[in-house]
């Protein structure tokens, strides 16, 4: 993947995270792009039995999924691709 495509994908990451947070938080109006970094967990990795994995919806995890599915533009589309439905 070339740098131009990766730059485009990186610009989609906060929008997808924002959609996800709005679906999780009870009052979606409280979640804004300005508060996004405060509301996301600081831990980017999860330690499992004998391995370390990327944390769900961290910047790197979303970028990894966008590289796998470059046609995805929203959280709903990403969720469909991941769950296979």
Image: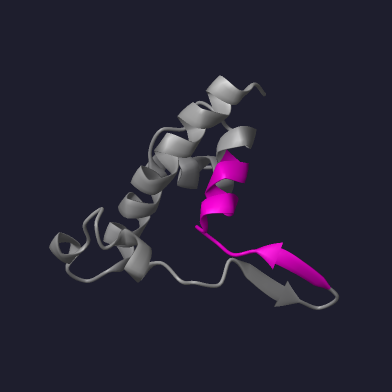
Look at the picture and state if 28 lies above or below 14: below
On the image, the x and y values in percent for residue 77 come to 43, 38
Residue 26 or residue 55, whichever sits in front: 55
Q: Is residue 18 visible?
A: yes
Residue 33 or residue 50, whichever sits in front: 33
Residue at the spot x=81%, y=78% of the render? 49
Residue 35 or residue 17, whichever sits in front: 35
Residue at the spot x=75%, y=76% of the render? 48
Look at the picture and state if 52 lies above or below 69: below
Q: Is residue 84 visible?
A: no
Residue at the spot x=64%, y=35% of the render? 68
Please give left or right for residue 45 compared with residue 76 in the image: right
Number of numbered discs visible in the structure rendering: 0
Report if residue 64 lies within the magenta region. yes
Q: Residue furthest right?
A: 50
Q: How is the image coloured?
A: one colour
Q: Residue furthest left?
A: 29
Q: Quadrant of residue 65?
A: top right
Residue at the spot x=86%, y=75% of the render? 50
On the image, the x and y values in percent for residue 10 come to 48, 38
Q: Which residues are magenta?
A: 51-65
Residue 36 or residue 83, whichever sits in front: 36
On the image, the x and y values in percent for residue 53 come to 71, 64
On the image, the x and y values in percent for residue 9 come to 50, 33
Look at the picture and state if 57 lies above or below 11: below
Q: Quadrant of the N terminus?
A: top right
Please give left or right for residue 70 compared with residue 77 in the image: right
């Amino acid at each position: 993947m070339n740098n131009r495509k990766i730059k485009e994908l990186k610009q989609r990451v906060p929008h997808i995270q924002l959609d996800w947070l709005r679906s999780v938080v009870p009052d979606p109006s409280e979640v804004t792009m300005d508060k996004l970094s405060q509301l996301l967990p600081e831990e980017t990795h999860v330690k499992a039995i004998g391995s370390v994995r990327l944390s769900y919806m961290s910047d790197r995890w979303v970028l990894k999924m966008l590289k796998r599915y470059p046609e995805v533009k929203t959280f709903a589309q990403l969720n469909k691709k991941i769950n296979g439905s």
